[in-house]
């Protein structure tokens, strides 16, 4: 594997950063989302030398790896961490989702509000695991003109839900554009193929989509995530909030929190661990 250089004196690494990164850190994602982001497929390993970083952080990333690949990924995180280095992992909290699902199930028949909450939390539990196309059923739900439980969704998804609604107008415009219609015509082309080729085309399309990093391949709670970290050789495993950390001035990086102090992804489980001295 070709190793990259650590970006700056601040030996902090953000993996699967998406658009959420600090320019002083070393940042990696499938595709480069800015000049300070290295494009690399982390399924192939982490492209840095052993013992390179004081902190390895990833938010809403490990659930995108299949269960066995997740173990290899966390082992790689352990490898690139310096002894006594800190690992901070953020994932959607399966326990929180399941508890809310059960509450919503009990209340769904009694009120319209809880029926809507039931629908939303079922999507959180299942949609990203099973979807075969961009945005899945969640995007369909969020795109409705009338949403009765916007407050509930915002409590779960924070600023991300707001951003989705703010960009709805732009998406509606794009969907009506001529270019979009031409693209749709092209997409209907497979219907002209013989049946076996249509099935092959569909299988390849789904396969490509499911490997692009959007779907969840597994989910974690405070028990299974701690077991995963321990299995990969990490210790001093602790549950955190968005603001608590072994890292000094954690909130100043605005990764798990927004500049106004609110939590970026309130549906999250935050956990930290340390690489042993030897
Ligand atoms: C849900 S987004 C989270 C982005 C960001 N960390 C955040 O919290 O907003 C998951 C990110 O992981 C990236 N990702 C998933 N699998 C990856 C892989 N194998 N290699 C590199 N990046 C990957 C995706 O491209 C995406 O940007």
Image (tube, rainbow, N blue to C red):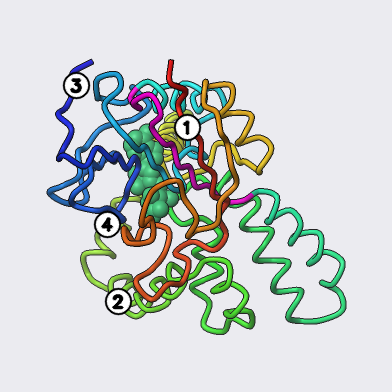
Q: Secondary structure at mark 2?
A: helix
Alpha carbons under labels 1 and 3: distance apart: 23 Å
Nearer to me, 181 or 273: 273
Residue 36 at x, y = what percent? 16, 47
Residue where numbered disc 3 is placed: 3
Residue numbers of the magenta segment: 80-93
Nearer to me, 275 or 208: 275
**Disc 1: CA contacts within 10 A as few (<14), some (14-19) or many (>=20):** many
Nearer to me, 126 or 205: 126
Q: Nearer the viewer, mark 2 or mark 3?
A: 3
Alpha carbons under labels 1 and 4: distance apart: 49 Å
**Disc 2: CA contacts within 10 A as few (<14), some (14-19) or many (>=20):** few
Badge 3 residue CB within 8 Å of ligand 1: no
- Of the two numbered discs 1 and 4 on the same chain, state the one appearing first in sequence: 4
- Residue 192 can be seen, yes or no: no
Quadrant in which ligand 1 is drawn:
top left
Q: Is residue 264 left or right of residue 93?
A: left
Q: Nearer the viewer, mark 3 or mark 4?
A: 3
Residue where numbered disc 2 is placed: 170
Residue where numbered disc 1 is placed: 274
Residue 183: mark in rendering: 4
- Of the two numbered discs 3 and 4 on the same chain, state the one appearing first in sequence: 3
Q: Secondary structure at mark 4?
A: helix
């Amino acid at each position: 594997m070709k190793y990259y250089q650590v970006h700056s004196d601040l030996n902090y690494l953000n993996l699967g950063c998406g658009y959420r990164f600090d320019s002083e850190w070393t940042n990696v994602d499938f595709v480069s989302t800015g000049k300070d982001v290295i494009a690399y497929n982390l399924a192939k390993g982490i492209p840095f030398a052993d013992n390179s970083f004081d902190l390895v952080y990833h938010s809403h990333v490990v659930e995108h790896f299949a269960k066995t690949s997740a173990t290899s990924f966390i082992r790689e995180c352990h490898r690139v961490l310096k002894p006594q280095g800190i690992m901070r992992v953020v994932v959607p909290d399966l326990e929180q989702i399941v508890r809310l699902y059960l509450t919503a199930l009990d209340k769904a028949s009694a009120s319209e509000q809880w029926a809507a909450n039931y629908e939303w939390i079922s999507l959180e539990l299942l949609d990203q695991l099973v979807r075969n196309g961009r945005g899945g059923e969640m995007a369909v739900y969020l795109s409705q003109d009338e949403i009765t439980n916007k407050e509930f969704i915002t409590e779960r998804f924070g600023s991300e839900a707001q951003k989705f609604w703010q960009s709805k107008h732009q998406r509606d415009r794009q969907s009506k554009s001529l270019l979009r219609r031409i693209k749709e015509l092209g997409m209907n082309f497979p219907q002209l193929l013989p049946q076996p080729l249509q099935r092959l085309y569909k299988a390849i399309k789904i396969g490509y989509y499911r490997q692009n990093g959007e779907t969840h391949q597994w989910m974690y709670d405070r028990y299974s995530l701690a077991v995963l970290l321990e299995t990969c050789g990490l210790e001093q495993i602790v549950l955190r909030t968005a603001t608590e950390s072994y890292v000094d001035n954690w909130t100043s990086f605005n990764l798990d929190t927004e500049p106004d102090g609110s939590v970026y992804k309130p549906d999250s489980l935050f956990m930290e661990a340390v690489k042993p001295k030897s």
